Image (spheres, rainbow, N blue to C red):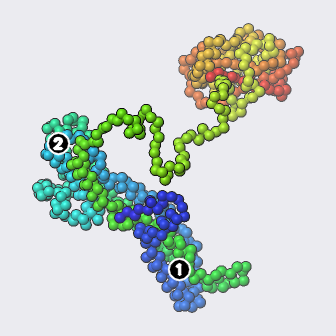
Amino acid sequence: MTVSYILDSSTSTVGSFLRILFRWRGSVWKSVLVEVIVWIVLYYIVFSIYRFSLDTIQQKMFESIGRHIDIRLHLLPLTFMLGFFVTIVVDRWKNIFQNIGFIDSAAFYINTYIRGDETEINNQRRTLLRYLCLTQVLVLRDISVPVRKRFPNLDSLVDSGLLKKNERELLENIPSVGFNNYWIPINWIFVICYRLRLCGNIVADMLMNAILNEVKVFKEKLQILCNYDWVPVPLAYPQVVFLAVRIYFLLCLVSRQYRINEHEKKQNEEYLQIDRIIPLMTILELFFIMGWVKVAEALLNPLGEDDDDFECNFIIDRNIAMAMTMAEMCYDKTPEQIISEDSCDDLFNPKTELTPLYAESIATQPQHPLVGSATLCNLPEEHLPVRMVERQQELKRGSNVDDSLSNTNSTELSTEKGLNLRRFSNISMKKLRNMRQSISIPIQPRFCGGKLSKISEKQIEQIKNGWPAENLKNSLHTLEKLDETLERQNDITKLPARKLSAPVLLTTTSSLPTPTSPEKQKPTRPFHLPLAPVNEDENLESEENPCNNKCQTRRGRINLNYKFFC
């Protein structure tokens, strides 16, 4: 009893919308017509009593009650309850349809893997497929009203040919002990398949298992249908939803009445409200919300007799016809494979150009092929040369990059070239130890005679070829080596201060030893060692004088950047 409107909505036009809107069978008009008419009749009954049967005092009391209800009517969460309920119902409806049971897969396996042209073997194939259809009918006649009306008893199954008399006697003689007997035809299928395997009509155990697995899947789908019929949505939920909607519109009979005495007091205002003889907005609200409820009621049991319920009888007829036709007329039959030497006879010959054909009426319609959207960008032509360079990654402070020092390519800087180590030497060892918590990627500076040694070409190649920098993370050994180096190189602090002519480059080395017991630390932000440019003739202040350090800080800072190769 499914209502199909897909053809009318094949194109999105005003005409298709109108064709769908003015359908009657399965439409919202048919669903809510009775409720809307009943509500309008009740509204005008209350309207007449309020206008003509009550005196002024009683009218004012009625108006106060209506005002009180109207103010608090929004406290009923209709939208939330209906939305959640319809979601649950649609999910059940979808799962029931997915497990309704189509016999195609099992029929393909049975018709292909059971070999033999003899009459007995053909009869066995047909019997197996008939048992599958019989199982489906036994299930659906217990959960679907239309199928129950079609097959009210076992005699009707015998008359329809799905069940033979001897099979009926065997079916009735097996005690059900108060439970259903859907499993009996499935058991017959398993036994027959085993006998066919012993006789060699099923040539391998793997093929027999494939047939039985398809039968098992078919049976499991029918079991899911039984489970949905056995355990529906908890009764309290549909009761709450359906009752809340009806009560809401019953209260609207009082709250949506036009209050005479209240609006007479407002005649001196800028606007004058029109007497609401027809509650148009309330009728529209009733139409939409009640239609929403009717959708949920129809989907709650899709195996019933509503306009949009599943066509279970059609599914049974279709499975029987397809299974019997496949077993009787399609066993081991395929078209003759003709190899034509003339390429004109084979339009899909790989030696010729493949040109798909269309009907002449639609051959000129435009197509929108599968083409990547990025291919439409205006980029240089593919034949033009493009220079490819390495990407230089730099250590960042937060989210900002020091652009002034980002383009340096130096690998060797010395004090003779103007390296100012004044501020570097004034940093106390205690402060260096505290900086351990600020290091995110450790480095290993190498001092040789008052200058930073040049990194070897082999180490540079290792770093450029993808030496993972994460192996250097959280290495306290590096900072300890830095402390020891500074302590040994005390003579560096006695060197005359020079202006910084180039940024200091500290590179990672592949010879960094792994600490024996590194501590697990959280990744932190990298730090920069501040350097202050001073005059060459200026004397070095001692570490113990904090005032000089403070003054040096105010003169200016140059961040010590760390450049890493990847």
Q: Name the residue at 80% across, 26% down.
A: 557
Residue 485 lies, in percent from the top left, at: 69, 13
Residue 453 lies, in percent from the top left, at: 70, 11
Residue 530 lies, in percent from the top left, at: 76, 25
Label 2 neighbourhood size at 10 Å, few (<14), some (14-19), many (20+)? few
- Tell whether 408 sits left or right of 439: right
Q: Residue furthest right?
A: 537
Q: Which of 529 and 101 lies nearest the eye of the viewer?
A: 101
Residue 117 tag number: 2
Residue 248 lies, in percent from the top left, at: 49, 72
Q: Which of 405 and 385 lies nearest the eye of the viewer?
A: 385
- Tell whether 121 sits left or right of 552: left
Q: Vertically, is 301 above or below 460?
A: below
Q: Name the residue at 71% across, 16% down.
A: 411
Q: Which residue is mark 1?
A: 254
**Please, what is the three-letter code of the amino acid marked with disc 2?**
Asp
Which of the two discs, 1 and 2, sits closer to the camera?
2
Q: Name the residue at 42% across, 58% down.
A: 90
- Tell whether 353 sits left or right of 134: right
The quadrant in which the N terminus is found is bottom left
**Please, what is the three-letter code of the amino acid marked with disc 1?**
Val
